[in-house]
């Protein structure tokens, strides 16, 4: 794999803004949960993909600024379901389609770095009886979101020619072998669904 280039100044500025926001929260910081692409990178590290694990959304790993905060990071199962919904909502919009290719690649990054049986167990629990949630409406909503996410995974990510895998292939072009990326995403997604 080629050496990584230094981070774009935009990423550095985005991290600085996030840290400023976390600092401003003060005692309320414990209520913050980091989600999205940066949460994926915290869960997976650099991984074995040549794509740079940086984002302008909420990146915490670019600035040498000594400020550090403890925040909760969304779990792998939650991140996969959220990414699946995000990709599906934008698949039919060619203008946004290009921007979500990285999200499909993030899903592969999550799957490669995760304990698939463990993630499957979390998804199964969320579908049947979400633990720790006492409100019936919230439990029903969690179950519905997870079930829809699993349908999206099944329809858009389990074959190399599925739209989600094609997006991951596009995001990998020029960095990683696109065919391997699409095949890996399809195989790991199918394996996860088989376990769920």
Image: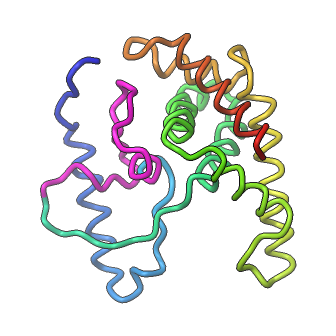
Which residue lies at the image location 47% right of the left edge and 48% below the top edge?
A: 40
Quadrant the N terminus occupies = top left
Which residue occupies the foreground of this view, 28 or 153? 153
Q: Is residue 36 above or below residue 186?
A: below
Q: Quadrant of residue 65?
A: bottom left
> Is 94 on the left-hand or right-hand side of 12?
right
**Magenta stretch prevailing secondary structure:** loop
Which residue lies at the image location 83% right of the left edge and 40% below the top edge?
A: 151
> Is 8 on the left-hand or right-hand side of 31?
left
Image coordinates for residue 33, horizontal then vertical, percent? 48, 68
Extreme residue toward the bottom, this view: 27
Image coordinates for residue 128, horizontal then vertical, percent? 86, 63
56 within the magenta span: yes
Q: Is residue 124 above or below residue 90?
A: below
26 within the magenta span: no
Which residue occupies the foreground of this view, 150 or 38? 150
Which residue lies at the image location 35% right of the left edge and 38% below the top edge?
A: 53
Q: Is residue 181 above or below residue 45?
A: above
Q: Quadrant of residue 165?
A: top right
Image coordinates for residue 17, horizontal then vertical, percent? 28, 61
> Is 88 on the left-hand or right-hand side of 102?
right
Span shown in magenta: 39-64
Q: Is residue 170 above or below residue 87?
A: above
Which residue lies at the image location 13% right of the left edge and 55% below the top edge?
A: 64
State how the image is colored. Answer: rainbow
Image coordinates for residue 80, horizontal then vertical, percent? 62, 46
**How many discs appear?**
0
């Amino acid at each position: 794999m080629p050496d990584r280039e230094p981070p774009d100044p935009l990423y550095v500025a985005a991290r600085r803004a996030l840290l400023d926001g976390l600092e401003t929260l003060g005692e309320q910081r414990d209520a913050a949960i980091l989600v999205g692409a940066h949460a994926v990178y915290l869960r997976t590290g650099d991984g074995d993909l040549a794509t740079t694990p940086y984002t302008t959304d909420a990146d915490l790993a670019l600035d040498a600024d000594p400020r550090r905060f403890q925040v909760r990071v969304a779990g792998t199962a939650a991140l996969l379901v959220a990414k699946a919904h995000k990709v599906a909502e934008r698949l039919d919009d060619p203008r946004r389609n290009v921007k979500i290719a990285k999200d499909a690649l993030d899903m592969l990054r999550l799957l490669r770095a995760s304990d698939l049986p463990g993630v499957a167990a979390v998804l199964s629990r969320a579908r049947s009886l979400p633990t720790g949630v006492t409100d019936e409406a919230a439990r029903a909503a969690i179950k519905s979101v997870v079930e829809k996410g699993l349908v999206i995974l099944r329809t858009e990510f389990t074959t190399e020619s599925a739209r989600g895998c094609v997006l991951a292939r596009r995001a990998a072009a020029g960095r990683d072998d696109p065919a391997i990326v699409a095949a890996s995403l399809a195989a790991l997604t199918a394996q996860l669904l088989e376990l769920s």
